[in-house]
Image (tube, helix red, strand yellow):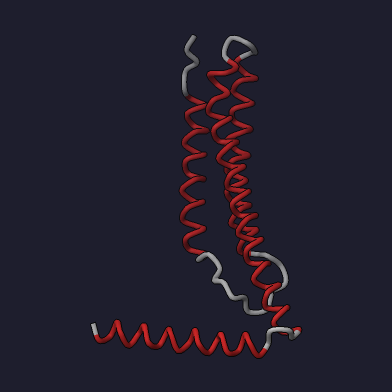
Amino acid sequence: MADSSREEARRTRMAAQRTTMTVDMADSADRRTELAATRTVLAAERTYASWTQLGLGALAAGIGSRKLLEGLVAEWMIFGTGMLLVLFSAFCFAAAVWRNLSPGVPPPRPDVQRLPAALLIAVNGFLALVSVAAMIGVWLGPVTG
């Protein structure tokens, strides 16, 4: 419990120091640069979320295309559409991680923390494996009618 109290006291001191620094730099160009860096990190996270959302939508569409197109178009077209959508979903999951880990020119130190790279790779790696499993299911699964 004492360690916890010391840690909280240390965090409070650090927050007070940051607040003092923020007040000193309120109108400075340095502060505007730091705020721009924070906006850049948050924009990268929104871009990551958009790529992941697009990948999940493409995955759902690729899986659903088999049932939806059944009886409307030729079997090869159903297969091709499903495979293309599922492969696109795997690309989106890889692009999400790549875009978030390679944002370009490194910004100044932002006020917010970036998402951990290991977490991004783990989550999107799992989603890419789901895409591969769906692709195998689209490829090998029978069309029921």
Quadrant in the picture for the N terminus: bottom left
Q: Please tell me in which quadrant of the rendered image residue 36 appears.
A: bottom right
Residue in view at x 54 percent, y 71 percent: 113
**In the image shown, does 114 or 143 lie closer to the viewer?**
114
Q: Is residue 135 above or below residue 18?
A: above
Q: Give the percent coordinates (x, y) of residue 84.
A: 63, 32
Q: Is residue 14 left or right of residue 97?
A: left
x 65%, y 90%: residue: 24
> Residue 23: horizontal and vertical position, in percent?
63, 87
Locate residue 87: give its quadrant: top right
Counting every numbered tag in the picture gives 0
71 shown above or below 3? above
State the image coordinates of residue 60 (x, y, percent, origin top left).
Answer: 54, 32
Left or right for 142, reference 85: left
Q: Name the residue at 65% across, 13% down.
A: 73
Q: Nearer the viewer, residue 134 or 40?
A: 40
- Is the residue 121 above or below the residue 1 in the image? above
Residue placed farthest to the right in the image? 29
Residue 25 x, y percent position in the rendering: 68, 87
Residue at the extreme left? 1
Whether residue 74 is situated above or below residue 27 in the rendered picture: above
